[in-house]
Image (cartoon, helix red, strand yellow):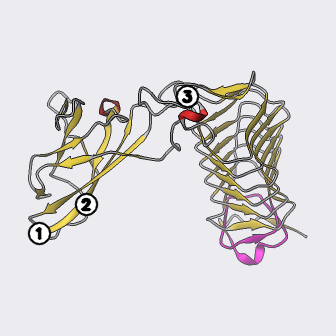
Amino acid sequence: MVVLIVSVAGVVAPSLLSAQTVIITDTTLTADNVGGITIGAHGIVLDCNGHRISGAATGITLNGKTSVTVRNCVVTNNGNGIVVSSSSGNTFEANTVEGNAGGIQLTAAGGNMLRRNTVRRNSQFGVRIDTFSNGNNLRENTISNNARGLDVLSSVGNTVVNNNFFDNQVQAAVVGTTWFSLALPTGGNYWTDFDTPAEGCSDQDGDGFCDAPRVVVSPWGQDNLPWTRPFGEATVVSIDIKPASLNPGAQGTIPVAIYSTSSFDVSSVDLSTVKLAGMSVALLGNGSPQASLVDLNGDGLLDLLVHISTEALDVAARSTNQTGTLTLEGRTLNGGAIRGTDSVKIVGD
């Protein structure tokens, strides 16, 4: 049975979600769907709202469509998870595709975006790009524990960057020129079989990238800037907030030290991204960040001293004489996340 959804109402009731479903308007699921869903129109959005699609030959089918967005779907226990054919300019984001035979397959489908998806434990492949599927973009996906993480067959010009490849039996098999890295600060991908010196990954300059490329399949592609840790995982940094007691309503700035180590150089920190409890680095009269490089602990390494404005400091623990933990977050110039915490006593109102 095929259920054709023609209502312009954006929410699909559970009673409609049985067997094969065809949608032709923007659709948000309110229940799990047993059976596949076919996208039947251009330019629409399928938002599964975290619900499952399972028990079908193909979980989600997109054929001959453009400008479609599929997001927040859990596609599991199907023959194939998501199959896209003869379709371009579509976006698949924040989906979980797991426990199928095949994960996400693109066939004669170019110019699509796959981002922030989790593709895991599929018995044949995680992502397959096949038969003149050119110019697709894969970013910030986690592809793990599949028989093959990525298959590229007879397709060229695909960009695969800032993804995490975890413990696939074959991480990537490529026939067709594929870009696995871009210029800094974007870099390449993280590979669990290429993240230690024994595997060929050393990071002598401490920039967060392996000094040598990870060859995927010669001559079709190599990752020239593999990440030394999973993309998106924050480097824990040591910080020191002075003074140890502060009044969030007081005027002025709070000095915060960020310490260098043998494996982390604070000069790589992008000051425009640094925030302490939601507040940015204060600016001087000329608009530059109020920050300096100085050896604060006498270890011979330059540390970073930044000043944070106190006037609108977002402090969770405002109660008098309570100890609160404040978190500093930011990014390095190459895009890597940093995170550090310190405890302070919150005084005043």
Q: Is residue 280 above or below residue 226?
A: below
Mark 3 lies on residue? 225
Which badge, 1 or 3, comes first in the chain's sequence? Answer: 3
Q: Is residue 117 above or below residue 297?
A: below
Question: Is 97 on the left or on the right of 240, as rendered?
Answer: right
Which badge, 3 or 2, comes first in the chain's sequence? Answer: 3
Q: Position of residue 206 (x, y in %)?
A: 41, 31
Task: Kindly identify the amino acid type of the residue bearing the numbered disc 1.
Answer: Asn
Mark 1 lies on residue? 321
Contact, CB < 8 Å: mark 1 with mark 3? no
Tell how many labels.
Answer: 3
Q: Position of residue 50 (x, y in %)?
A: 62, 65
Task: Kindly identify the amino acid type of the residue bearing the numbered disc 2.
Answer: Thr
Q: Position of residue 222 (x, y in %)?
A: 66, 26
Q: Nearer the viewer, residue 38 or 97?
A: 97
Which mark is on residue 325? 2
At 30% from the left and 29% from the top, the residue drawn is: 267
Examine the image and state in which quarter residue 180 appears: top right
**In terms of secondary structure, where does tag 2 sit?**
strand
